[in-house]
Amino acid sequence: MSGKAERTKELILDRVYPLFSKRGFKQVTMKDVCEVTGLSRGGLYSHFAGTGELFEALLGKITEKDAMDFHGEISKGLSATEILEGALRLMEDEMEHPEDSLSIAMYEYAEVTGSDVMEHFNRIWEEKWTALIRYGIERGEFSNVNVREVVNVILFSYQGIRMWSRIIRMEPETIQSVTGHIRNLLIRKDL
């Protein structure tokens, strides 16, 4: 793909994030995307065949360029506790801002398409968190926990709050109790 085409695709993905986070998946049309990007329908369709393809590309971009690059931080030899603390701060920030969440759009997308796309992205996150927790256990910084169990607690409590915070107000104490629980499960108290 040419440099200009790639830049246009990036512009589209940057502009549609707020659209999907505000409206969900079902309410976003290609006409809406044209309006927020300034592209003609033909120009838009030369990059994406429809909102499903566009949404999948957005999820891929988010996952690929995620701020929680545990593998990169692990390969640098950073402290597992330091990596965890950074991830928990980021999670708290995201949970405190439901207006920026794609949770409803992801739910609607999975409901409409019936595809395995959400399973795919969930597996990526399972692998990231599993790697971090095992790294922390190996370094002696984390307790010897059931890794799969803790990964489930992390992923599903995080997504649960992201989803529910769109419906009801989440108090900061609620969010901090979840991240505090994760911290207490993992970080060894005898250090």
Image (spheres, rainbow, N blue to C red):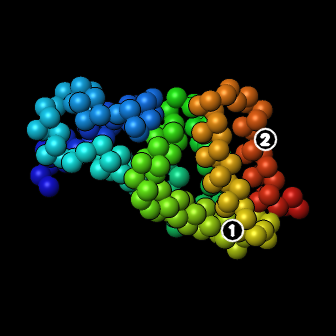
Q: What is the number of the mark on residue 109?
A: none
Relative to 49, residue 96 above or below: above
User: Residue, x 81% and y 53% (percent of image)?
Assistant: 184
Please name the residue that numbered disc 2 is placed on.
177
Quadrant housing residue 21: top left
Could one spot residue 140 in this view of the protein?
Answer: no
In the picture of the structure, the residue carrying the numbered disc 1 is 148
Please state if 4 lies on the left or on the right of 73 as rendered: left
Taking the image as drawn, is residue 170 in sight? yes
In the rendered structure, the answer to whether residue 68 lies left or right of residue 29 reads: right
Report the residue at 13% width, 31% height from top: 40
- What residue sits 60% from the left and 39% below the top? 162
Q: Taking 74 as reference, is 160 above or below it? A: above
Which residue appears farthest toward the bottom when viewing the image?
A: 138
Q: Are marks 2 and 1 in contact (CB under 8 Å)?
A: no
Give the residue type that dot 1 points to: Arg
The C terminus - image quarter? bottom right
